[in-house]
């Protein structure tokens, strides 16, 4: 199943640009808000198994990608993982790091799949990431039970203002990665059963038509089950929480000299089985 946030309402996606409004098609039995729906995720999934999709034909609605908001508009918690791919760790120079870095992003930075981003400086970098959407709360989740707590996977960009990130010693992450529209999440939440192997998904991004990142999530230093084990060993994960799982090699700061986003650039982030995010960039005073 694929779930989208269409103009602020949870929708089951039937094809690329057609879906049904969850609240309407269930005659109000389930909420329109995606975060609230995820709080009843197991119940909703059971309900969908009893409904032939042909019965939804009368309720189909078309949408444009510009209509899509972040798959979870107001998550309680957003976690992000740094240095979780070996070649990315090497290109950043943090070669002695033995554990991924964990930080947070702020919900006001979330956006949908197609957005325009105002660049706050000339040092904004790209980071394609697979994003986990939590569907079942839990603490101390063992790796073998991790996928039982996951509603689905989606795609994200962890845009990063490197000047802000490294302005102090030690560097800080959260604020530098939380400017407006710095955290697009979408286009869809895709349930794990839709993937041949949810632990091995290809992802990357293309800048102005040039591929700059490409890798597979199987190459993470710490995979999704291990990440949930670590996080839930400290905090309680809740339905709708987002986990940005780290970025592969190919970010701008890894170039010599560094290469950053400029006004007029177009960045397309993609993941197999999920879709793409498309961002355009403009100057602050444009």
Image (cartoon, rainbow, N blue to C red):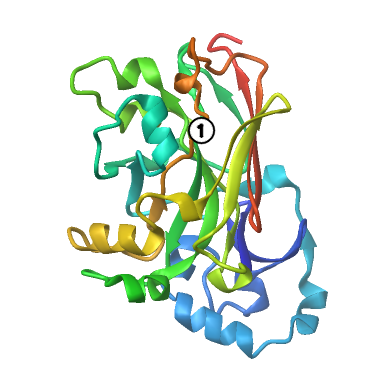
Report the side of 47 relative to 167 (left or right): right
Q: Is residue 186 visible?
A: yes
Q: Is residue 73 visible?
A: no
Q: Position of residue 205 (x, y in %)?
A: 61, 36
In the depicted structure, whether residue 26 falls above or below residue 131: below
Report the side of 267 relative to 155 (left or right): right
Q: Position of residue 38 (x, y in %)?
A: 45, 68
Q: Quadrant of the N terminus?
A: bottom right
Q: Decide which of 137, 222 is in the foreground and name it.
A: 222
Q: Residues within 10 Å of mark 1 (few under 14, many from 20)?
A: many
| Residue at x 36%, y 64% (from the top left corner) | 225
In the depicted structure, whether residue 264 falls above or below residue 269: above
| Residue at x 65%, y 72% (from the top left corner) | 24
| Residue at x 50%, y 50% (from the top left corner) | 130
Report the side of 28 relative to 88 (left or right): right
Res. 140 image quadrant: bottom left
Q: How many marks?
A: 1
Q: Decide which of 255, 269 is in the foreground and name it.
A: 255
Res. 214 image quadrant: top right
In the depicted structure, whether residue 209 falls above or below residue 275: above
| Residue at x 34%, y 44% (from the top left corner) | 81
Q: Secondary structure at mark 1?
A: loop
Q: Which residue is mark 1?
A: 181
Q: Position of residue 17 (x, y in %)?
A: 77, 56
């Amino acid at each position: 199943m694929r779930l989208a946030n269409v103009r602020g309402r949870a929708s089951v996606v039937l094809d690329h640009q057609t879906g049904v409004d969850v609240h309407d098609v269930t005659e109000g039995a389930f909420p329109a808000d995606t975060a609230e729906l995820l709080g009843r995720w197991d119940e909703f999934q059971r309900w969908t198994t009893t409904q032939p999709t042909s019965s939804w034909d009368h309720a189909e609605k078309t949408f444009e990608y510009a209509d899509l908001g972040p798959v979870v508009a107001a998550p309680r918690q957003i976690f992000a993982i740094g240095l979780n791919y070996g070649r990315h760790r090497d290109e950043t120079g943090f070669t002695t790091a033995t554990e991924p870095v964990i930080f947070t992003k702020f919900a006001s930075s979330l956006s949908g799949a197609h957005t325009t981003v105002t660049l706050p400086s000339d040092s904004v970098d790209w980071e394609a990431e697979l994003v986990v959407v939590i569907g079942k709360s839990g603490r101390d989740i063992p790796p073998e039970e991790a996928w039982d707590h996951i509603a689905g996977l989606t795609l994200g960009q962890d845009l990063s203002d490197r000047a802000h990130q490294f302005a102090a010693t030690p560097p800080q992450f959260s604020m530098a990665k939380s400017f407006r529209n710095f955290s697009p999440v979408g286009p869809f939440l895709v349930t794990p059963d839709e993937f041949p192997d949810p632990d091995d998904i290809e992802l990357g991004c293309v800048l102005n038509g040039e591929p700059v990142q490409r890798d597979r999530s199987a190459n993470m230093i710490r995979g999704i089950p291990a990440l949930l084990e670590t996080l839930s060993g400290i905090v309680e994960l809740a339905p709708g929480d987002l986990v940005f799982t780290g970025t592969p090699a190919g970010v701008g700061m890894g170039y010599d000299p560094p290469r950053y986003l400029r006004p007029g650039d177009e960045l397309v982030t993609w993941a197999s089985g999920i879709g793409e995010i498309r961002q355009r960039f403009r100057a602050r005073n444009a």
